[in-house]
């Protein structure tokens, strides 16, 4: 979920037949919609690598082969894996599946993915409004970093500067 931004039920509903390694995308049922409605999401490089490792591991353990209709993860498997990982890392609290979705969202925003694109990947029905409200605080550090890249000390071509009043009347 940290590599895809999928919700828990979307991730748990993901089957091997939903992953197109050639087209680098996956489809999963949309939350709260008819299960026959499926949206495509890019298969991000880290997610692709993880899925290939899972598939290879299952094939090596000879788990009755992998059938296209098999689910990739189970709800209990996901929760248990997160709990075990937190214990192994000696974290004070257990992270949830939604923390993984937040991680995905924050990393995408920090790496410059346009908000509207990210909202589509996350399947937000309201476009980008929820993202902007929810993740504004996460943007503070990134905002300062981006602000440090703005340079006003460049040469100004005064012959091509249009005064604001003229720009308004010409528009």
Image: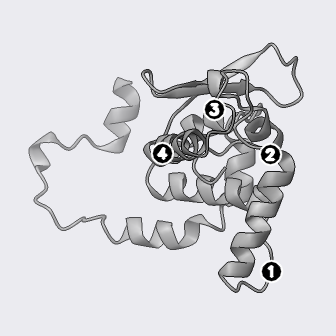
The numbered mark at residue 93 is 1
Image marks 4 and 3: residues in contact by CB distance under 8 Å: no
162 relative to 18, above or below? below
Q: Image check: 128 left or right of 154?
A: right
Helix, strand or loop at mark 3: helix
The CA span between labels 2 and 4 is 22 Å
Give residue 127's quadrant in the image.
top right
How did the renderer colour the structure?
A: one colour
Residue 107: mark in rendering: none
Judging by the rendered image, the residue that carries numbered circle 4 is: 113
Q: N-terminal of the two: label 4 or label 1?
A: 1
* Residue 40 on image: x %, y %: 61, 23
Q: Name the residue under label 3.
A: 120
Q: Is residue 153 left or right of residue 26?
A: left
Relative image position of residue 30 (x, y in whole percent)? 78, 27
* Quarter residue 164 falls in: top left
Q: Looking at the image, which residue is at 53% across and 53% down?
A: 109
Q: Which residue in the structure is indicated by mark 2?
A: 8
The local crowd at label 3, few if under 14, some if 14 to 19, many if 20 or more residues have their Cα within 10 Å, is some
**Marks 1 and 3, how far apart at CA:** 30 Å
**In the displayed structure, would residue 81 be above or below residue 68?**
below
Q: How many marks?
A: 4
């Amino acid at each position: 979920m940290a590599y895809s931004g999928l919700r828990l039920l979307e991730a748990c509903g993901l089957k091997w037949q939903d992953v197109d390694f050639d087209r680098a995308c996956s489809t999963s049922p949309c939350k709260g919609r008819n299960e026959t409605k499926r949206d495509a999401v890019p298969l991000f490089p880290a997610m692709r690598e993880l899925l290939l490792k899972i598939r290879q591991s299952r094939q090596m353990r000879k788990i009755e082969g992998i059938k296209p209709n098999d689910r990739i993860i189970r709800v209990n498997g996901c929760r248990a894996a997160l709990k075990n990982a937190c214990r192994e890392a000696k974290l004070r609290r257990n992270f949830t599946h939604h923390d993984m979705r937040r991680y995905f969202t924050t990393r995408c925003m920090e790496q410059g993915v346009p908000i509207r694109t990210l909202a589509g990947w996350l399947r937000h029905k309201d476009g980008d409004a929820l993202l902007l409200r929810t993740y504004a605080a996460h943007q503070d550090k990134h905002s300062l970093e981006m602000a440090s890249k703005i340079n006003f000390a460049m040469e100004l071509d005064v012959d091509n500067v249009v005064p604001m009043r003229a720009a308004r009347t010409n528009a």
